[in-house]
Amino acid sequence: MNYHTRKWVKPEDLNPNQSLFGGRLLQWIDEEAALYAVIQLENKKIVTKFISEINFVSSAKQGDIIEIGIEVTKFGSTSLTLACQVRNKMTHQTIITVDRIVMVNLDEDGNPAPHGKTQVEFVKDRLKPKDEL
Ligand SMILES: CC(=O)SCCNC(=O)CCNC(=O)[C@H](O)C(C)(C)COP(=O)(O)OP(=O)(O)OC[C@H]1O[C@@H](n2cnc3c(N)ncnc32)[C@H](O)[C@@H]1OP(=O)(O)O
């Protein structure tokens, strides 16, 4: 699991019970999954197709720093399946887990299109001149 994004829980992210609103957390996760898929598949036309069971393990409160982890669990033909875990940055206490997030690669017309990827790639490797790879 790679933790790329950190968030600082602010007053506008809270529910009426003063803990992190679950809908806000899901919004952050969906955006993180989309960004991850766009970068991996090198295509800006990506949609979220399916999100599996969501387990709200513990809550976060105002001022907490949380981090969002994403891991690829499957490269499909047009899809990329991800797992997600969000944890407290300082204590590593798990806040939420999502077993499966299926992102679909689309063509110009919005139809599913094969992405041709089979393994995780790193942008730094793509930027290296070919003779260094
Ligand atoms: C980041 C965002 O905000 S995106 C906004 C929210 N999302 C959307 O608006 C998406 C709306 N949905 C759609 O446009 C359509 O459902 C599409 C284009 C994504 C997919 O259309 P479909 O007719 O289901 O396509 P299709 O049957 O070819 O499936 C595409 C891929 O999704 C997978 N898939 C489809 N349904 C499911 C499902 N219920 N669960 C898991 N995977 C699924 C398929 O296995 C396939 O993957 P593969 O090619 O790797 O085997």
Image (spheres, helix red, strand yellow):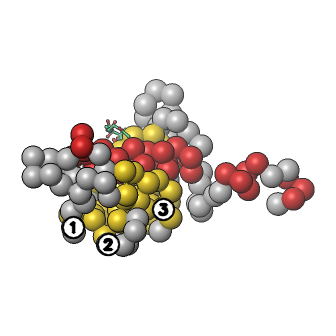
Query: SS at mark 3?
Result: strand
Q: Residue at coordinates 56% horizontally, 46% vertically from top-left?
A: 39
Place of residue 84 in the rendered image (x, y in percent of width and height, measured from the top left): 37, 62
Task: Using the image as rendered, state which of residue 55 and residue 24 is in the foreground.
Answer: 24
Mark earlier in primary sequence (2, 1):
1
Q: How many marks?
A: 3
Q: Are marks 2 and 1 in contact (CB under 8 Å)?
A: yes
Mark earlier in primary sequence (2, 3):
3
Mark earlier in primary sequence (1, 3):
3
Give the amino acid type for the residue marked by disc 1 in the picture.
Ser
Q: Residue at coordinates 25% horizontally, 60% vertically from top-left?
A: 60
Place of residue 111 in the rendered image (x, y in percent of width and height, measured from the top left): 43, 34
Give the amino acid type for the residue marked by disc 2 in the picture.
Gln
Look at mark 2 in the image and give the residue it sits on: 93
- In the picture as drawn, the residue positioned furthest to the right comes out as 131
Disc 2/disc 1 C-alpha distance (Å): 8 Å
Look at mark 3 in the image and give the residue it sits on: 3
Place of residue 13 in the rendered image (x, y in percent of width and height, measured from the top left): 25, 44
Let me know if residue 78 appears in the view.
Answer: no
Look at mark 1 in the image and give the residue it sits on: 58
Q: Are marks 2 and 3 in contact (CB under 8 Å)?
A: no
User: Pointer 2: residues within 10 angstroms few (<14), some, or many (20+)?
Assistant: some
Query: SS at mark 2?
Result: loop
Give the amino acid type for the residue marked by disc 3 in the picture.
Tyr
Disc 2/disc 3 C-alpha distance (Å): 14 Å
User: Pointer 1: residues within 10 angstroms few (<14), some, or many (20+)?
Assistant: few
Disc 1/disc 3 C-alpha distance (Å): 18 Å
Disc 3 CB within 8 Å of nearest ligand 1 atom = no
Let me know if residue 107 appears in the view.
Answer: yes
